Image (cartoon, rainbow, N blue to C red):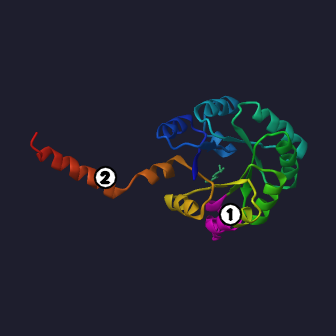
Amino acid sequence: MKLFLDSANLEEIREVAGWGVLDGVTTNPSLCSKENASFEDNIRAICAVCPGPVSAECVSLEADEILVEARGLARLAPNIAVKIPVGLEGLKATKALHAEGIAVNMTLIFSAGQALLAAKAGARFVSPFIGRLDDVSEDGMALIEEIAQIFENYRFETEIIVASVRHPRHVIEAARIGADIATVPYGVMEKLVRHPLTDLGIERFLADWRKVKK
Ligand code: E4P
């Protein structure tokens, strides 16, 4: 499974790239609003650090305007995937962008029907938001299973990005189901590495090492 970092913070992205586990980055307007650099400069810098797909989100709502915005974003770097919220206008834009060879990450997916239409329109990625579904007492991971089954049935090449990840278990379950990608916030990425028994084990080994005759 590929791991993307769900962040617009260059330091976090550099750090995780250094761990050797970074396959891509997803940003959104909320994440970008936390950064000091201008939006375009920040996206260009992220694309230089991360060779994998970097999602940058369109904020236009009409297909014609989405197209203009998406083409502009795609010109920022060769590894841009334009993020477009699912909807009728978004689908029209996705169809045109797919024909132009621009990768689309169709975002804010909350149902299998939305994912199916996004795939048919030519989206390279779909981003189902599982944490936000869990937040309203629905089963986010069940949606991932449903979409994965549908994409497998019809051999869609569209990749599933498990998004709105809240804790390490989300990542493990996504991997168990066979989702293509999980986009993970920095804090959750760190938690994936840590285990109290590992820390305790290191502490004990170091204490015992001090007793070894040298
Ligand atoms: C994904 O592409 C989104 O940026 C993100 O996962 C949304 O997560 P949130 O629900 O924590 O805002």
Q: Is 214 rendered above or below residue 191?
A: above
From the top left corner, tell me how far across and down residue 103 is, in percent.
Answer: 76, 43
Disc number at residue 148?
A: 1
Check residue 203 for magenta coloring: no
From the top left corner, tell me how far across and down residue 44 is, in percent.
Answer: 66, 30
Residue type (three-letter) at the residue carrying disc 2: Asp
- Quarter of the image where the C terminus is located: top left
Magenta region? 129-148
Q: Residue at x 69, y 68 (%)?
A: 146
Principal secondary structure, stretch drawn in magenta: helix
Q: Quadrant of residue 26?
A: top right
Q: Quadrant of residue 45?
A: top right
> Mark 2 near mark 1, Cβ–Cβ under 8 Å?
no
Q: Along the horizontal axis of the image, is 61 left or right of 124?
A: right
Q: Secondary structure at mark 2?
A: helix
Q: Is 104 rendered above or below residue 79?
A: below
Q: Nearer the viewer, residue 1 or 87?
A: 1
Q: Is 14 rendered above or below residue 207?
A: above
Q: Residues within 10 Å of mark 1 (few under 14, many from 20)?
A: many
Q: Which residue is mark 2?
A: 199
Residue type (three-letter) at the residue carrying disc 1: Ala
